[in-house]
């Protein structure tokens, strides 16, 4: 689940097993009605986070993420 820490998108890193890892260059896609942010962490590991419509639109409006496919 995505959380907002500061101004960027953060998520859980499965590989390093740490919470609230900042996502670098996130892209928010809409798949099956769900808003999914995908990006990488500082080490280059792929990350994904699911969020609601309001949160996704807020991140795009603030410039924290880019729009992907499905919009």
Image (cartoon, rainbow, N blue to C red):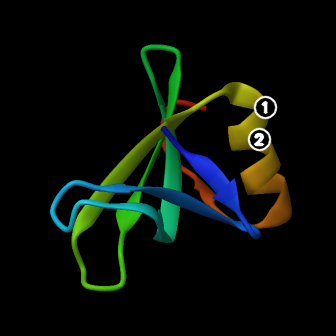
Residue 36 vertical placement versus 6 (above, below)? above
Q: Residue furthest front?
A: 18
Mark 2 nearby-residue class (10 Å; few <14, some 14–19, many ≥20) = some
Residue 11 falls in image quadrant = bottom left
In the displayed structure image, the side of residue 13 where residue 61 appears, left or right: right
- Residue at image x 36%, y 84%? 42
Is the residue under label 1 in contact with that under label 2 (CB below 8 Å)? yes
Callout 2: helix, strand or loop?
Answer: helix
Please state the horizontal and vertical placement of residue 29, each as a whole percent of the image.
49, 39
The residue drawn where x is 84% and y is 62% is: 62
Q: Residue at x 35, y 74 (%)?
A: 41
Mark 1 neighbour density, 10 Å: few (under 14) some (14–19) many (20 or more): few
Q: Please name whichever residue, 19 or 41, is drawn nearer the observer in this view of the structure.
A: 19
Q: Quadrant of residue 13?
A: bottom left
Left or right of residue 63, residue 31 in this image: left
SS under mark 1? helix
Q: Position of residue 23 (x, y in %)?
A: 47, 68
**Residue position for label 2:** 57
Q: Is residue 70 above or below residue 37?
A: above
Position of 4 relative to 24 (above/below): above
Q: Which residue is mark 1?
A: 54
């Amino acid at each position: 689940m995505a959380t907002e820490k500061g101004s960027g998108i953060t998520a859980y890193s499965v590989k390093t097993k740490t919470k609230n890892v900042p996502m670098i260059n996130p892209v928010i896609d809409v798949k099956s009605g769900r808003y999914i942010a995908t990006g990488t962490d500082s080490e280059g590991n792929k990350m994904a986070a699911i969020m609601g419509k309001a949160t996704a639109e807020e991140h795009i409006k603030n410039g924290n993420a880019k729009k992907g496919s499905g919009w």
